[in-house]
Image (cartoon, rainbow, N blue to C red):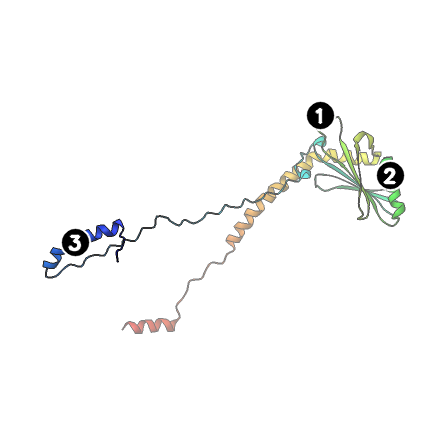
Amino acid sequence: MEEILDKNQVSVLEAVQENEEEISVSETPEKIEEIDSSPIATTSSKPVSRPIAKKEEPIPNPLLEDPYEWDKCTITVVYALHPDHSVTVSIHNHKDEPIVKSFTAADVPLPEKISSKMKTLQAIWPFSTISATVVLPPKPGDAPERVIVVSMRAGGDTPIVLTDLESNMTFPPLINSMLDELKALLPSRALKRIEKDAKTKIAPSNKSAAKTQSRPVPKPTTVPPAIANKTQLSLF
């Protein structure tokens, strides 16, 4: 049966035939080294590199990113009308500590657009607190005044939302005085915010250093006397 030989096998056979005479004459013939004629694999397996997933950065909160400037930061006024007709007013900038004061409903009347809807909600839910959250977003650079967003609800019910210009939503004098107080406190609140952010950034590094220092030092291992005696006896 004829066999088809590749080039490597043919070259091996030719080399063997050329050396047959020398091999037959020699008294101690040398062993012929076998040559592997199998094809050499040219493909090399490389580890597949997986793309490193990027850590998603949280979306910045606009209430925190606004600068501490009166026309460029968000001001929030929360007006809570209780069943006994007393009112609690809370005013804050960003997410800082609010200024909170209590009044009677007659002392702090809201604009008609807001008060009429709050009275309707109070008539439906007489034993619930009716709240109105008035948000003053930052004033755009080319806008003459702010646009106010108002959200009214009874307890945890679905809110009623309306928007209007600041000039059409005039606050009573007592609430305006609270707004003036907050405006005067903005510079000092900005400094407190800077100090708070600095402490927050330093705290993680201090914790990691404290963990490193608090790690117990490993004790040196001592050989029990019995084992030491056995070792000495085995040497002699």
| Pointer 3 or 1: first along the chain | 3
On the image, the x and y values in percent for residue 224 come to 40, 70
| Residue at the limit of the structure toward the front, as seen here | 1
Q: Describe the element under mark 3 as helix, strand or loop.
A: helix
Quadrant of the rendered image containing residue 75 = top right
Instruction: Judge the density around disc 2: few (<14), some (14-19), many (≥20) Cα neighbours within 10 Å.
Output: some
Residue 115: mark in rendering? 2
Residue 208 visible to an observer of this rendering: yes
Q: Describe the element under mark 1 as helix, strand or loop.
A: loop
In screen coordinates, is 201 left or right of 119? Answer: left
Instruction: Judge the density around disc 3: few (<14), some (14-19), many (≥20) Cα neighbours within 10 Å.
Output: few
Q: Which residue is depicted at the point 77% across and 34% down?
A: 148
Residue 84 visible to an observer of this rendering: no
Q: Nearer the viewer, mark 3 or mark 1?
A: 3
The amino acid sitting under disc 1 is: Asp
Between 92 and 216, the one nearer to me in the picture? 92
The amino acid sitting under disc 3 is: Gln
List the residue tagged with mark 1.
Answer: 142
List the residue tagged with mark 3.
Answer: 17
Q: CA distance from mark 3 to mark 1?
A: 99 Å
Marks 2/1 in contact by CB < 8 Å: the verdict is: no
Up the image or down, 95 lies above or below 23; here it is above
